[in-house]
Image: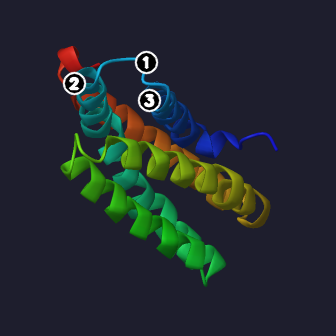
Amino acid sequence: MLRDPSLVPLSRQHQHALALCTLIERRRAGPEELERKTRDLYEVELRHHIDIEERILFPAIREGLAPAPLVEQLVAEHREMERLVAGLPQTLEQFAAALRSHIEREERDLFEDIQKRLPREVLDRLGRVIHAEVVRICLSRPAAEQ
């Protein structure tokens, strides 16, 4: 299914994260460089991505589609990924595997479901808020991080 425009900013960030997972899995760089790239992507993008999901997207899903056990599972996975990032470099491969699995679950299960079941006006509102948050975060970064 084509991704709803309201979710495209989050899907785009998923693509960046999956590219990192591929680098790690194929060992396309040395361990120090992979650790640096992982920490950089986490600090610059993933940390904010998780915040947007937990502060904006997940509450809307809970409100509109309660109960939402998948959302609770995804929040637990966020905590696990935070734990794995804190344990780098020893947890690099575990982090990549957890991140890939998490993204696939969000894209395949969560996003597909909410595109079908959330009302159009809710998706449109979410899209505006998510886009504004992504832009705000990008504009607040120092130029060296962009």
Query: Residue 72, position in %: x, y?
Result: 48, 75
**Residue at the spot 73% in from the left edge and 64% down from the top edge:** 119
Q: Residue furthest bottom?
A: 67
Q: Which quadrant, please, contains the N terminus? A: top right
**As displayed, is residue 71 above or below residue 87?**
below
Among the two numbered marks 2 and 3 on one chain, the one whose residue lies closer to the N terminus:
3
Circle 2 residue: 32
The amino acid at mark 2 is Glu
Query: In the rendered structure, are the residues bearing label 1 and label 3 in contact, judged by CB atoms less than 8 Å apart?
Result: no
Residue 120 is situated, as x and y percent measured from the top left of the image, at 73, 57
Q: Amino acid at mark 3?
A: Leu
Q: Are the two marked residues, 1 and 2, in contact with CB atoms closer than 8 angstroms?
A: no
Counting residues from the N terminus, which is met first, the one under dot 1 or under dot 3?
3
Disc 3 target residue: 20
In the rendered image, the vertical position of residue 32 relative to residue 61, given as above or below: above
Q: Mark on residue 28?
A: 1
Name the spot of residue 133 as percent of width and height, x first.
38, 43
10 Å crowding of disc 2: few (<14), some (14-19), many (20+):
few
At horizontal 69% and vertical 61% (from top left) the residue drawn is 114
Q: Can you tell which quarter of the image residue 137 is in?
A: top left
Indicate which label's residue lies in the foreground, 1 or 3.
1
Q: Mark 1 is on which residue type? A: Arg
